[in-house]
Image (cartoon, grey):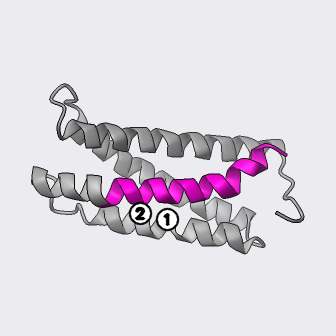
Amino acid sequence: MTNAIKIDEKQYELIQQYIDMLETIEDALDYVTASFTDIEKTEGGRVLADVFGALGQVSESNKIFRDLFSNRPEFITVLEEFETVIDQALELNGHFQESNVKEEIVKGKLSPAFSDWRLKIDRVMKPLLNN
């Protein structure tokens, strides 16, 4: 990456918290996915509700990062791709009581979409933490 972005301590903390939050969401989605087949994991529904709240926080954070990186199109593009994750999450509307449909959407769409997007975010943001 040419002309490295310089970030201050506050921005560093914000980026670190954001990356940590994304990791927590991915762990939560893994738990929800496992809960469909592992009867020991009884909190799948509650964890999924928490994931929805966290996705809202990611959307809000993305607005901050859009402003922070407004002159970096590669950042903006990846931030905008979060809409794909939101689209997958919205497919769950009206299906929370339908275990089969919920499992299909979480395992087959939402979780993979989030994981793919998170890898892209990691590629553009983690280098900022190493400067």
Image coordinates for residue 101, horizontal then vertical, percent: 14, 58
* C-alpha separation, residue under disc 1 versus residue under disc 2: 5 Å
Q: Residue at x 16, y 53 (%)?
A: 96
For label 1, the residue is: 82
Residue 108 lies within the magenta run: no
For label 2, the residue is: 85
Assign a secondary structure to mark 2.
helix
* Quadrant hosting residue 67: bottom right
Q: Inspect the image, locate mark 2, and give the three-letter code of the amino acid beneath it.
A: Val
Q: Which disc number belongs to residue 7?
A: none
Q: Inspect the image, locate mark 1, and give the three-letter code of the amino acid beneath it.
A: Phe
| Residue 27 appears anywhere in the view | yes
Q: Residue at x 60, y 64 (%)?
A: 63
**Crowd band around label 1 with a 10 angstrom C-alpha radius: few (<14), some (14–19), many (20+):** many
Range shown magenta: 109-131
Say left or right for 76 vs 28. right
Q: Residue at x 66, y 55 (%)?
A: 123
Q: Looking at the image, which residue sits at the far right?
A: 3
Image coordinates for residue 120, horizontal then vertical, percent: 59, 59
Residue 120 lies within the magenta run: yes
How many labels, in total?
Answer: 2
| Residue 61 appears anywhere in the view | no
Assign a secondary structure to mark 1.
helix
Say left or right for 119 vs 125. left
* Figure check: 73 above or below 90: below
Image coordinates for residue 111, horizontal then vertical, percent: 36, 53
* Quadrant hosting residue 5: bottom right
Q: Residue at x 28, y 58 (%)?
A: 108
**Crowd band around label 2 with a 10 angstrom C-alpha radius: few (<14), some (14–19), many (20+):** many
Q: Are marks 1 and 2 in contact (CB under 8 Å)?
A: yes
* Figure check: 91 above or below 122: below
Image coordinates for residue 95, horizontal then vertical, percent: 15, 59
